[in-house]
Amino acid sequence: MTPPALIAALTAAVLLAGQVHAVAATAVPADPAVLTNLDHLDFLTDTVRPPAQAGHTTYRLDDEPSIGVLWAYADDLPGGGYRRVGGGAYDAGTGTYGQGAYDADDVSRAAVVYVRHWRQSGDRASRDQAYRLLRGLTYMQTATGPNAGNVVLWMQPDGRLNPSPIPVETPDPSDSGASYWLARTIWALGEGYAAFRAADPPFAAFLRDRLDLSLAALDRQVLSRFGEHRVVDGKRMPAWLVADGADASAEAVLGLNAYVRAGGPPTARAALARLAAGIAEMGGGTGVWPYGAVLPWARSRSSWHAWGAQMPSALAEASITLRDGRLLTPALSDAASFTPGLLTATGPINGLLPAPADDSQIAYGADARVQSLLSVSRATGSAGLRQLAGVAAGWFFGQNPANVPLYHPDTGATDDGVHGDGTVNLNSGAESTIHGLLTMLALDAAPDLAALARAAGPVVRRDGRRTVEAESGRLDGPVSVVTPASAWTGESQWSGGAHLRVRAGGRIRWTVTGATQPRLVAAVINRVPGPGGVTAFASLGSVGYGGGGAQGASPAPGALLPVEVTGQLPAGATELTATGVLGSGDLDALLLTPLVSALVTRRAVLLSSVARTSRRMTFDVPGTGPAVARSYDSHGRPAGTTGGRGPITLDVPSGGFVVAAEPGPGPVCASEDAGLAAQAQAEGRMFWLSRNRFAGS
């Protein structure tokens, strides 16, 4: 499935109800001291006896004919509880769905949850669930023939596989090529092998064989192109990513990393290194788009989404295993530069395209930010990035557009997403449940971060990057509004569904909300190859629409890209004017970014700087007790600590961030940065050598 189709499918899956099939769940009160509650995930699990199907079998199938599966969705019931449902249209006559009841994407990730819970808590029930689901997942894997190692995505309630679902997935049939579900299968098999290697050697040997089968599929379908590149709007992009996705490839890297650490063969290490190298090439520079983020799709320079964006986590973990600091550099930029700005502006939205065109948010995206920050903090020894992970986890406790908790520890359910307008989808399907629990497992392992996540819950105020639609201005002269038939360009999206065509002599005046500090101004334009028009912004500078690269493998000519205007919009300014001075060009939106952005929550504050110099800021931390504020530079290194009751004044480093909160259990102490860095060095992880360079210890 291509990323545009995935965006549409995910939005539909998490924000629309499905067909009813099963019964409601019964909530069991959770231990209030522990956030992880597997009750709802247990409710979604099931077993099935699949009929004989060519090319499909699993471990001890003759002796254990039932395999573990997982319902894809769960509809909220008005009286409480949930009904398990499948995907696609339901046919009551046949008892089947257009897609199916169970899918390999969710079975694989649920297995990861149970494996991690078993290893973290020693819980035997989670070990048994992991065993059942890994058997079910490997049944969905094609074991023989030309597609051996690939995976069928959907299974019907009676255990029959559905390789060509409706709506159609890509590839079709779903086991005919590399896919997101192949990547997630590798993730689950890698973590499963590492867990069962000592606990159940015969089963681990089976998982190893199936993982090697997937590796063979990965080699022939993806890594055979290692070193090849495609031109996408003038930029060289790696051609050896799973489904052209750094996001999909990252999940495969997580499994390969676990496999290599557990003694996997040289072929696994080579695959890990090659796939991680491709992801690393998707990293972007700081200061301009994509603001340090690792881009998810190798067919577009203009799109980023929070869901599945575990690229920094994959790179950081691989950098530790492979002792390769080159992998850590883009991961660190994503964690320390991009993520603080994202959290202060919108939170983990489904689409920066490149303006925030899809403002819905789901647990998959929120968890990806948490996991990535934790992995990069481990790789660098940065307490600052570790704290930032706690702030990011606040999404589950109210730091979202609805300002309400989306994870429910009494049931273990996570709501299926929230729109930008605050509307919550109260359903709780497999994906949301899984990624909510992955974050809760991380928080249960770190009580101080759990306390910080709760403190960073409901939002009091966000003051970050804001969008001004180009067509919202007052128009004079040769400038017109263009409303395309589709806002999706094939690689990105027109913000607001429209844009301006600005010709020489055309003028636009925007009224904007005043601010207490200067703001950077970026114009989102359609940058085209060769010469192009020029638009001047009064007193600030100009932007040119030309100079873009060749289209190459991009799905659309030109590229929607933010281009920064040289000057800054002064504090207090409420009007912005632009004039076409040469030729013509398409202007989509303006992005206004305060030099220091702020996220203020119930008991925590995050500041994020895009300033070229350090800036002194004064702010209050909501709450009743004294707060501690710690500043970090653009690499996540400590820059200062202060605190107390009432207003706090400190210097925010250029390009850095600040985390301030009331101390919780196990608070970050003044020496923790040095302690984490020393531990990272002792364990052979990455550590700081100089201001701008990382290397292996």
Image (cartoon, rainbow, N blue to C red):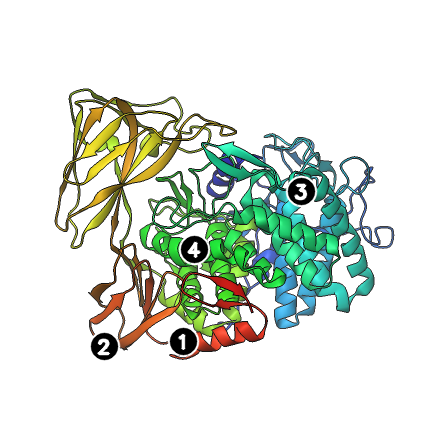
Report the amino acid beneath label 2.
Arg
Residue positioned most to the right: 62
Camera-side mark, 2 or 1: 1
**Foreground pick, 454 / 230:** 230
Q: Residue at x 38, y 48 (%)?
A: 291
Q: Amino acid at mark 1?
A: Val
Image coordinates of residue 172 in percent, x first then y, are 66, 30
Is 112 or 471 nearer to us in this picture?
471
> How many residues crowd around disc 3 within 10 Å: few (fewer than 14), some, or many (20 or more)?
many
Q: Secondary structure at mark 3?
A: helix
Which one is in front in this view, the residue at disc 2 or the one at disc 4? Answer: 4
Compared to residue 696, the image places residue 7 above or below, namely: above
Which residue extends farthest top? 478
| Callout in the foreground (3, 2) | 3
Mark 3 or mark 2, earlier in chain: 3
573 relative position to 120: left or right? left
Residue marked by disc 2: 645
